[in-house]
Amino acid sequence: MKKTEMFKGKRVLVLGLAKSGSAAARLLFSLGAEVTVNDARNEDPEEAPLRGLGVEVILGSHPDDLLGRGFDYVFKNPGIRYDHPVVSRAISAGIPVWTEVELAWLVSEAPFIGITGSNGKTTTTTLLHHMLHMGGKNPLIAGNIGTPACTVAAEAAPDQPVVIELSSFQLMGTEAFRPKIAIWTNLYEAHIDYHGTMEEYGEAKFRITKNQGPDDFFIYNADQEAVSRFAERSVAKKVPFTLAGRSEQGISADGEAVYWLGERLFGRDEIVLPGRHNLENALAATAAAILSGCPVEAIRDVLSSFAGVRHRTQFVREWQKRRFFNDSKATNTLATKSALEAFPGPICLLAGGLDRGHSFEELRPFMGRVSSAVFFGETARRFGEFARSCGVADIHDAGTIEDAVRIASEVSAEGDTVLLSPACASWDQYPSFEVRGDRFIEAVRKL
């Protein structure tokens, strides 16, 4: 870890505790900062250990006079919006407002490989981590996938690549962050309530390559015009990936094989993850692995055995000749569209959840693959009306995930794919998509 002196003796506010806030507070304290942590919650398990270190912890509210203490820096939880009173006042006062990703970059001696995108981040990150591990690179994994970036960066050796999944929320709070390799999987409309406009959302994603130089690499989705337009502004070495056929540039795929700089790497049939979207993820991860010096055989071993990330088109089990898949992470229609596209049908679709009023129309081209459907949550009625308009006749309502699994086991037929892909957030019934997915897995295993 770099023993940076920039925080020594400085007053730093960590806004929002949770896992990343606690990690940032501990690291800043070790770097000599005078740290204050503030969270609106009344209690947190990290409170006592932080107080034991000498960190000031203020819980239960955001005091109006908080910024009157003369803070030099603010590190905020990524989920806290920029119109939050404390954040907006700090920005108006000229105080840098960063996320812990920036702190991780400032202390790291290890190279970063950053992955962002509207969809596919976690799968690409996990694939790449496995490839680098199989290739003997001893990688670490961090960021939006679970482990705070600053914790990993502080422990990483100079020769250990840090593979980091990055949301737009995290990237928006960076200033100098510069990964050696950056990946941008795709760009679709999302989080507009946070960013305000699609352009601002794209600008937040662009920060993954904004500071890269000519010696860095930027891997991007060349099949998306929106991403390609942003890529034109990057000064890094550009590595496009495309499914439009064999290309002499970057990494590409046609119906038969995957190619690197136009040369065949391996057959498409060696990739076990289903779906076009997962092929894109595989291309992006493969390109980064090659640029990191990973042997092709190690890459092939991973692609031929990696069955998916938990809650992301995850195969659960086969029961009475029906295959059950958990795609609880599909919290928007685009993700469910990708899941439906990945399976030829017939599909028994389990979907529904929090009603944000969004349209399901993106699913229409693939609803012909749905032979039966079970809907739950706030969107059950709207989903049922939409499915009927698509010609799906066998439609059922369920109260819970457990009810949905039971009904699906009764109405599906041998050879069907039973797919949980909600197209909605979980918060109307479950605290997270992980809890929803775990309940699905448990119910399927009890069949």
Image: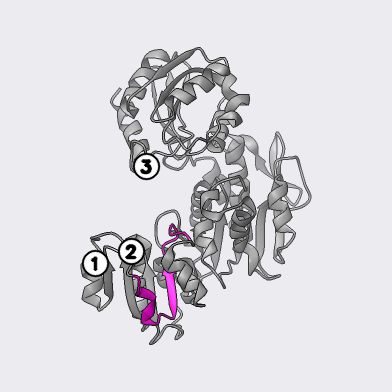
Q: Is residue 2 above or below residue 417?
A: below
Image spot of residue 89 (x, y percent)? 46, 71
Indicate which disc, 3 or 2, sits on the residue closer to the N terminus.
2
Residue 353 is labelled as none
Q: Quick one: 78 or 232, which is closer to the camera? A: 78
Q: Nearer the viewer, mark 3 or mark 2?
A: 2
User: In the picture, which quadrant includes the C terminus?
Assistant: top left
Q: Residue at x 46, y 59 (%)?
A: 81
Q: According to the image, label 2 marks what residue?
A: 17
Residue 47 is labelled as 1
Report, in whole angstroms, how far the alpha carbon at label 1 lies from the one at label 3: 26 Å
Q: Secondary structure at mark 2?
A: loop
Indicate which disc, 1 or 3, sits on the residue closer to the N terminus.
1
The amino acid marked with disc number 3 is Glu
The amino acid marked with disc number 1 is Glu
Image spot of residue 119 (x, y percent)? 55, 45
Q: Quick one: 130 or 395, which is closer to the camera? A: 395
Q: Secondary structure at mark 3?
A: helix
Q: Which residues are magenta?
A: 64-81
Q: Residue at x 54, y 62 (%)?
A: 171
Image spot of residue 98 (x, y percent)? 48, 69
Report, in whole angstroms, how far the alpha carbon at label 3 lies from the one at label 2: 21 Å
Q: Is residue 310 above or below residue 96?
A: above
Which class describes the residues within 10 Å of circle 2: few (<14), some (14-19), or many (20+)? many
Image spot of residue 388 (x, y percent)? 53, 16
Q: In the image, 73: left or right of 387? A: left
Q: How many marks?
A: 3
Q: Secondary structure at mark 1?
A: helix
Which class describes the residues within 10 Å of circle 1: few (<14), some (14-19), or many (20+)? some
